[in-house]
Amino acid sequence: AQSVAQPEDQVNVAEGNPLTVKCTYSVSGNPYLFWYVQYPNRGLQFLLKYITGDNLVKGSYGFEAEFNKSQTSFHLKKPSALVSDSALYFCAVNFVFGPGTRLSVLP
Amino acid sequence: EAQVTQNPRYLITVTGKKLTVTCSQNMNHEYMSWYRQDPGLGLRQIYYSMNVEVTDKGDVPEGYKVSRKEKRNFPLILESPSPNQTSLYFCASSLFGIISGETVRGNSPLHFGNGTRLTVT
């Protein structure tokens, strides 16, 4: 069975500060990991993915994520948050999603 | 423009009145899926399809039906809707999916429609 956990319902960060949204997963075999973002009244949009190779992957809008096999984690990061980054973020392994984390970036 | 189109965006209906939510993609994707989104529960998969005429249950299939007669279309059917099916529904597609053991794997991202907000009274 596959599962994804996002331990924080909500993450608050000040604009300009670094942000981290946490994700851990459980899957047999090598994982295909994804991050998606959802803005109000919209479907989910793909941000980045890890399939194989370098543990640090870069994606859209300045986001990056670090794959850690030993900790079965795939945390989303951004060096400097923008107010426009405020949205709902979902981690996924293959086609299975976590519960989502609401990110609020405060001006 | 590459997209997944689902209709309608909003739907209010009454218990027991059959309804269909349509979904169409123009990217020639093999894999398609329906999800429902509920607060605190994230996205839960209802049904998925690996290709034409191949469909399978997801995590929450009860009360739903799907069909995949053509590659581009994947309608979601509620034969007798109930209030607990009030939710936000998303159709999504991906280039392909692979069955590996008991797991469906895919290394190509999902493309989502804009959602259908269904209210059943």
Image (spheres, rainbow, N blue to C red):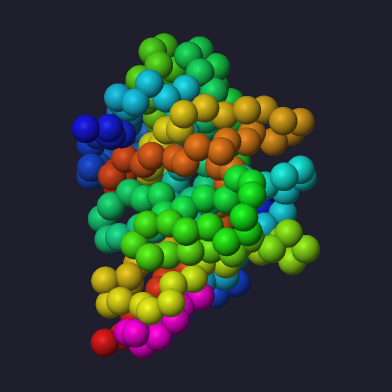
- In the rendered structure, the answer to whether residue B89 lies left or right of residue B106 reads left
Q: Quadrant of the N terminus of chain A?
A: top right
**Residue B75 visible to an observer of this rendering:** yes
Q: Position of residue A39 (x, y in %)?
A: 30, 60
Between A101 and B117, the one nearer to me in the picture: A101
Please determine whether, in this image, residue A82 is positioned above or below residue B97: below
The residue drawn where x is 63% and y is 36% is B105
Quadrant (top left, top right, bottom left, bottom right) of the C terminus of chain A: bottom left
Q: Picture coordinates of residue B15 (x, y %)? A: 35, 39
Q: Is residue B21 magenta?
A: no
The region drawn magenta spans A14-20
Could you tell me which residue is drawn at 34 percent across and 62 percent down?
A: A61
Name the foreground residue: B32 vs B77.
B32
Q: Looking at the image, which residue is at 67% across and 57% down?
A: A25
On the rendered structure, is B9 left or right of B76? Answer: left
- Expressed as whole percent of the image width and height from the top left, the position of residue B28 reads 38, 21
Q: Is residue B75 above or below residue A20?
A: above
